[in-house]
């Protein structure tokens, strides 16, 4: 039960812990349904990238093409508008594009109207620039909030989290590869970043080097690399 102490509201640890899990827990469906792994009976994984497109995305596309490895790119609408030719290149290479919002905000404490408007703006930008309409959505920072369920339903978006995230924005490539390689398993959804939020010309060297090492490692272990759609809906 909540109580007052010195004029401040005190929330029990249990309630605070639940709210933290509801907002960011990978398996939480409190604010919106969200998948975080595929079928553990299939030796397949999905490699996903957030925050792009960026000026460095092409380097990742080259590595993926070399190994005929499809991936899913959760793109930020503002970056798509800034680099439409890169967004188109991702789609033309046969990769899947998902919605990662338009402005990459923290959605907590935002209104349902703001959430839906931001997602809708990203949908429109990706469809206009890349020629595809996303069916999957990943929330910036993995943060879900009130109103997201309705926004996803109205825009025809299914939520996706991740099984393991690489922290490629602040770790070295050795550590990122080790982190992902040690946690990968059948049905895993791996999260990396081909951009750095809304920054122009971000340094994604760690991500590029991680992909260069990780893709052949996964293939050598017998994993099939698939898009999120294929991983989660293999019979479609």
Image: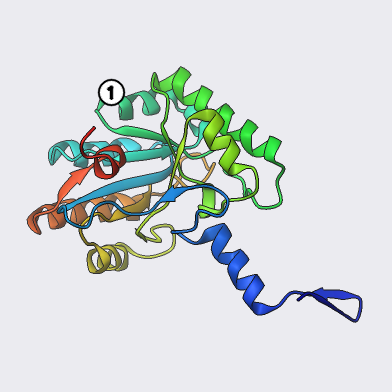
The colouring scheme, among rainbow, by chain, secondary structure or one colour, is rainbow
Residue 99 at x, y percent in the picture: 46, 36
Residue 86 at x, y percent in the picture: 37, 28
Residue 211 at x, y percent in the picture: 25, 51
Q: Secondary structure at mark 1?
A: helix
Total labels drawn: 1
Image side of residue 40 versus residue 27, left or right = left
Where, by quadrant of the figure, is residue 165 drawn?
bottom left
Is residue 205 shown above or below 129? below
Residue highlighted by disc 1:
92
Residue 93 at x, y percent in the picture: 24, 28
Is residue 185 shown above or below 127? below
Is residue 230 shown above or below 216? above
Few, some or many residues within 10 Å of mark 1 (<14, 14–19, 20+)? few
Residue 78 appears in view: no
Where, by quadrant of the figure, is residue 167 drawn?
bottom left
Residue 27 appears in view: yes
Front residue of 83 and 64 = 64
Instruction: Name the outermost residue toward the right.
Output: 7
Front residue of 221 and 214 = 221
Image side of residue 138 versus residue 217, left or right = right
The quarter of the rendered structure image containing the N terminus is bottom right
- Residue lying at 33% horizontally and 46% vertically, measured from the top left: 48
The quarter of the rendered structure image containing the C terminus is top left
Instruction: Name the outermost residue toward the front.
Output: 1
């Amino acid at each position: 039960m909540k109580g007052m102490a010195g004029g401040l509201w005190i929330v029990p640890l249990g309630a605070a812990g639940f709210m933290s899990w509801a907002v960011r827990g990978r398996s939480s469906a409190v604010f919106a349904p969200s998948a975080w792994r595929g079928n553990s009976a299939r030796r397949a994984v999905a490699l996903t990238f957030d925050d792009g497109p960026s000026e460095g995305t092409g380097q990742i596309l080259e590595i993926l093409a070399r190994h005929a490895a499809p991936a899913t790119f959760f793109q930020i609408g503002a970056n798509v508008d800034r680099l439409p030719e890169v967004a188109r290149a991702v789609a033309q290479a046969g990769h899947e594009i998902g919605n990662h919002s338009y402005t990459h905000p923290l959605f907590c404490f935002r209104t349902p109207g703001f959430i839906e408007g931001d997602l809708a703006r990203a949908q429109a930008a990706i469809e206009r620039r890349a020629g595809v309409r996303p069916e999957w959505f990943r929330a910036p920072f993995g943060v879900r909030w009130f109103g997201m369920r309705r926004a996803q339903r109205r825009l025809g978006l299914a939520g996706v989290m991740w099984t393991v995230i690489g922290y490629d924005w602040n770790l070295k490539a050795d550590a990122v590869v080790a982190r992902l390689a040690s946690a990968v398993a059948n049905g895993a959804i791996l999260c990396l970043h081909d951009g750095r939020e809304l920054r122009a010309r971000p340094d994604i060297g760690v991500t590029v080097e991680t992909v260069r090492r990780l893709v052949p490692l996964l293939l050598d272990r017998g994993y099939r690399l698939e898009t999120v759609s294929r991983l989660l809906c293999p019979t479609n």
